[in-house]
Image: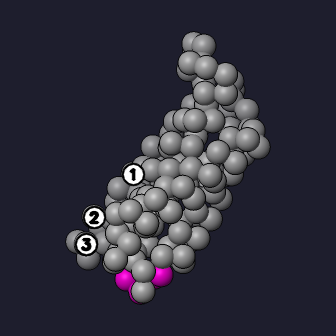
Amino acid sequence: MTRLFLYWAPLAAYMAFIFAVSTKPMPEGAPLFWQADKLFHFIAYFVMGVLWVRAIKAARPSTTAGEGIAISAIISFLFGISMEVCQYFVPERSAEVLDAVANGAGAAAGSLIYVSSCFKKRIVS
């Protein structure tokens, strides 16, 4: 039980954080560079992909590397899409397809890199 909590609690907290940040009006100020928000989306969902694949593996140790990556990336991508839909209704925010693409790419990259570099021996069956 404690082991699962150590993997699921950070994921739940991180997703709550992403929700909170995504549903607030955009902070004032110019972006660092053109389309900077795509990089922020990629990084945020990269972390989410890592957290998801860790939690999935903790809950179901028999999960293969491919299954972990696929499940993590799909769930994170769907969550990212739902955040884009929510942003449509938030003042000073907009729902953008390219943000959703950056979310999905970040989640897939995070899952893949985590599995291949950190815990390859444990996840590959």
Residue, x 39% and y 66% (percent of image)?
A: 54
Q: Is the magenta stretch mostly helix, strand or loop?
A: loop
Q: From the viewer's perspective, is 33 left or right of 95? A: left
Q: Residue 74's spot in the image, x, y percent?
A: 62, 65
Q: How far apart are marks 1 and 2 (CA)?
A: 11 Å
Residue at 67% x, 22% y: name it. Answer: 34
Cα distance between the residues tagged 2 and 3 = 5 Å
Q: Residue at x 50, y 63 (%)?
A: 112
Q: Quadrant of the N terminus?
A: bottom left
In the rendered structure, which disc, 3 or 1, sits on the residue that comes first in sequence? 3
Label 3's element?
Answer: helix
Using the image as rendered, state which of residue 5 and residue 57 is in the foreground. Answer: 57
From the image, which quarter does the C terminus lie in? bottom left
Residue 114 picture location, percent across and down = 42, 61
Boundaries of the magenta span: 59-64
Neighbour class for label 1 at 10 Å: few (<14), some, many (≥20)? Answer: few
Element type where label 1 sits in the image: helix
**Residue kind at label 3, given as amino acid type:** Arg
Residue that carries the numbered disc 2 in the rendered image: 6
Q: Residue furthest toward the left?
A: 2
User: Tags 2 and 3 in contact by the CB under 8 Å rule?
Assistant: yes
Callouts 3 and 1 close, C-beta under 8 Å:
no
Please tell me the numbered disc located at residue 3.
Answer: 3
Residue picked out by circle 1: 13
